[in-house]
Amino acid sequence: MMTDNTATFPSVPQRRPVVIENGAIGMLLFVVCEVMMFAGLVSAFNIARAGAGGVWPPMGQPRLPLEETAINTIALLISGVLIAYTAQRFNRAKAVADQTTHRILLAAILLGVFFVGFQGMEWLALLKEGLTLTSSQHGSFFYLIVGMHALHAVGAILFLVICWINARRGKMGKSAFSAACVLWYFVVGVWPFLYLTLYL
Amino acid sequence: MSDSHDHHESHGFMSYAFSTDHKVIGMQYMFTGMAMALIGGFFAYAFRMQLAFPGMDVPLYGIVSSAEYNSLVTNHGTIMIFWVAMPVLIAAFGNFLIPLMIGCDDMVFPRLNRLSYQIFLLSAIVLISSFFVEGGGFGGAWTSYPPLSAKAEYNLTPLGSSLWLLAVALEFVAFLLGGINFITTVMNARAPGMTMDDIPMVIWMIVLASILFMASVGPLIAGAVMLFFDQQLGTAFFDPDRGGDPVLWQHLFWFFGHPEVYVVLLPAMGITADVMCVFARKKLFAYRTVLYTAIGTGVLSFFVWAHHQFISGIDPRMANLFTVTTLLISIPIAEMCFVYIATLYGGSIRLTTPMLWALAFLGEFMIGGVTGIFLGASGSDIYLHDSYFVLAHFHYTFFPIAIIGVFAGITFWYPKMFGKMMNETMGKIHFWGTVIPFNCIFIPLFLLGIGGQHRRIYNYEHFPELAGKSMQDMRVFATVSLCIMLIFQFVFLYNFFASLLKGKEAGKNPWKSNTLEWTTESPPPHGNWKELPNCYRGPYEYSVEGREEDYWPQNIPDDEPAGGAA
């Protein structure tokens, strides 16, 4: 069968001092692309809204749950802060095996899961009110943009869960965790902009 | 970095197909790209025959129906840009050259690299399969403007158009992964001693192209998702009847589409710079100027996209603005061409095959650049838009990039890739047999375009003002030239494979070049070097005064007498 000759990398250590971890640079570049993608989506939404003649959502369309989502937004922001705190603790020497750090990481992950779950409940409620992907431009853009964000959130949560499992086993890669953090900061950081654009 | 020193050499198909070695992946990209180029070239042959001899039973193809004509034109463009130029120029050369030229053993994310190629291969398979589904392949032009592309009742290719879109999206994912790898590798894995100014220009250009690609592709991915939803889920993002906006797609598409031109141009420019320095035995004139100019071009390329939409109903004031930025971008490109000419000045030029290709790149690309001025100015574009003038201009930029630039690169690095020299005589026959017919194809098309010949017409017999004998003669001339050019490509293929078997042994450094890839075996072993090199100087120290040899490899310390001391 196939031989995976990367199974035990790296054998050649990097030969110049690393300023930023490979994983962080790689993920940052990915995030640049994703920021531009959301910029594209949001500008498309703004153009559609400008074309609708001032009233948004259009008359007779369901309103979006502004207050509930505010709670959700705060949960996500706290999760971002917790991840930053975890990263700081991991950076200190020998903290990889620290139980408290693992618990903080888990709390951050659970807050993320809460965010996605809460958003899912909100979708179900809105679908009942008749707002679907094809019901109007309002619905199309809402599900498209929030759905795209949810996709990133789920991906980032899975990545963090893998890091959490590896951390508990005591073999978490620095590069991989820095990549997961960058992705999570992106998910957390882009959400308030989407919230203000779509819900207000 | 892969485990390179104590692994067990294993041969066989599976270990090749799933290799994480950057050189193997580079070769996979190159051969896939070459195979796709044959398909794209064959498509061009089929629809050019239809234009020259309408209704003819085309040898090897058969009768071209109007739906097939649209599909052939669309997929010729798509294949040549996304499945030939990008994989060969960026992915093949990037993968093969980056670790070798910066002195490391592999990419920093080897498995991501393998995934990148696998997704790319999948995208090619999806695209090819789209030709065989019900309704045939997508025929709405490579720009895929809605509402034509969004509604099956308009384009009559319900599956073909979605598969086309899916293939393009997968291809973007592949290049995203590849680009992340390239940039991270060049940032973190350079040989000790290699500063920013010691990086060979071709590597800089591939990195800049990857950055441009990553910064511009996002909006198109957004647009592609929206278009896919319109096609398959019944949303109305681009449907004017239900509150959508078709021009929105054009903005999202060209926001990517124009930087994309520079994504493929820059690597070709880089290859040319490296080839020219070696065969002029001279230092690159104004290294930093070239670099900063390329960065400036990249930044500016984000502000020119609407010159594709001058007649799409955008605000004329906006058109003025984009005319200015478009004409501005010709300045840095002209500057780069001048710098290259200055590099040649006073050099001891050797007209080897790669050098001929590099010189041809410069000459032919300038014709493309100069004709672009007429299209960038919104006034003259109103007349020339969507005519064969646009098409000929585009091919005069793209052919030098994707074909001439690639041949310069392949003929130059072939000894390093395979350890054998290519046959020079056959190389030169192929060169002249490609470049002369190329001009014979597209100069008539410029004239036809000025004469008012519109693009994307299946049969000009239906248009009395375009069906005259003189115009038809030019079409026939262009088509015959194309056939001659395609036939000469078999000289290259023969040379390529025959040299693999019976070419002269190349040795480590047949061109007496400075850059690090020439300091290892040809072809390089897995892991590239037995002992990884250090870097002591810039890549273009040719004909340095006081040295016996006229080159000074990057890996030789200053005080070491090898190669002739001061």
Image (cartoon, helix red, strand yellow):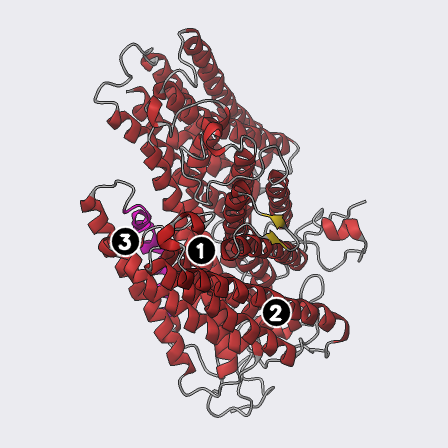
Q: Which residue is mark 2?
A: B488
Magenta stretch, main secondary structure class:
helix
User: Magenta region: which residues?
Assistant: B289-310
Left or right: residue B425 versus residue B382 is right
Amino acid found under the numbered disc labelled 3:
Tyr
> Which mark's residue is nearer the viewer, 2 or 3?
3
Q: Is A165 left or right of B172, judged from the image as shown?
A: right
Q: Earlier in the sequence, mark 3 or mark 1?
A: 1
Q: Is residue A57 magenta?
A: no
Please give left or right for residue A22 compared with residue B417 in the image.
Answer: left
B444 or B494, nearer to the observer = B444
Q: Which mark is residue B383?
A: 3
Contact? badges 2 and 3 (CB < 8 Å): no
Q: Please identify the quarter of the rendering in which residue B450 is found.
A: bottom left
**Mark seen at residue B263:** 1
Residue B447 spot, x, y in % from top left: 37, 64
Which residue corresponds to the image point at 55% horizontal and 56% vertical from the top-left? B49
- Whether residue B87 is visible: no
Callout 2 amino acid:
Phe
Please identify the quadrant where the C terminus of chain A is shown. Answer: top left
Secondary structure found at label 2: helix
Which chain letter goes with mark 3? Answer: B
Quarter holding the N terminus of chain A is top right
Based on the picture, tell me whether residue B305 belongs to the magenta stretch: yes
- Whole-percent x and y of residue A173? 60, 41
Q: Along the polypeptide, which appears first: circle 2 or circle 3?
A: 3
What is the crowding at mark 2: few (fewer than 14 residues within 10 Å), some, or many (at least 20)? some
The answer to which of marks 1 and 2 sits earlier in the sequence is: 1
Write the residue at 43% across / 30% down: B226
